Amino acid sequence: MATKEQLAKIFALEIESMRDEIEKLDRAAKRSGSLRDSVHREADRQVGYAYRLLEAYGPAEDLRFETGSEVHEALLEVGTTEGDMPFITETFRSEREGVLADRNGRTKSPFLRDVLHRMAQVGLDDTALNRDAANEEIFRARADVLLASADDPRKPKLSGGSRRSERAAAHTDVSHGSS
């Protein structure tokens, strides 16, 4: 059985990996001039909620998204819109299908490879229960990072000035050293 420490490490590793991925996407967006494009933040938010549903309900349950259903109402309560529902539904079902295909031995999806890699990183034995626990941590980490990314307007930070401070300090050192 997985320990709390192993699961916490899986979560931390996945958070770090997802943040790196978001940073890469941001660099690519900056290159194309679309860094502040709200479409990217909306997609992050929608995918984040699909992962949150996978974390909360697991992939075994075939959720209903129709108006009035528990899931539909829960999504509206957290701020999604009717327009978000088709994308969240499709993403949830696609990710769910991949996990279930892996469980049935039909595929070895990129997600399963990620799960097995994370488990190996923390020395967690490959058992069905450990895979399920690792899945949940990865779903939670992905949801957290994507939802945080959606809240981030991705505006460049112009405060801090650490390079300027370093240059000023270097200039001061050179000035004092030459006298």
Image (spheres, helix red, strand yellow):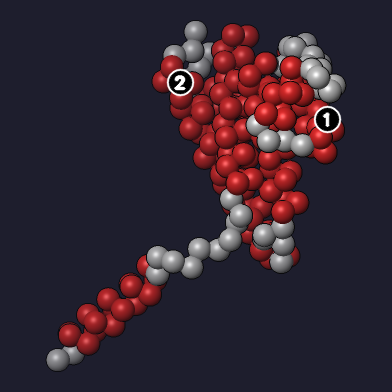
Q: Position of residue 38 (x, y in %)?
A: 72, 54
- Quadrant, the C terminus: bottom left
Q: Residues within 10 Å of mark 1 (few under 14, many from 20)?
A: few
Residue nearer the viewer, 50 or 103:
50
Query: Which residue occupies 51% across, 33% down?
Result: 13
Image side of residue 91 versus residue 114, left or right? right
Name above or below for residue 168 compared with residue 84.
below
Mark 2, secondary structure of its residue: helix
Is there CB contact under 8 Å for labels 2 and 1?
A: no
> Residue 111: x and y, percent?
69, 28
Q: Earlier in the sequence, mark 2 or mark 1?
A: 2
Note whether residue 111 is visible.
no
Mark 2 vs mark 1: give the one in front. Answer: 1
Label 2 and label 1: CA atoms lie apart by 31 Å
Asked where in the image residue 50 lies, by quadrant, the reply is: top right
Secondary structure state at the residue bearing disc 1 = helix
Which residue is at the front of the view, 90 or 153? 153
Which residue, given by chain and number where applicable, does mark 1 sit on? 90
- Taking 12 as reference, is 34 left or right? right
Res 67 label: none
Residue 161 visible at all: yes
Tag 2 residue: 6
Most foreground residue, 147 or 58: 147
The three-letter code of the residue at mark 2 reads Gln
Compared across the picture, whether 118 is left or right of 39 comes to left
- Residue 116 position within the rendered picture, expressed as x and y whole percent measured from the top left: 61, 23
Q: Residue furthest bottom?
A: 179
- Which of the pair 80/95 is nearer the observer? 80
Judge the density around disc 2: few (<14), some (14-19), many (≥20) Cα neighbours within 10 Å: some
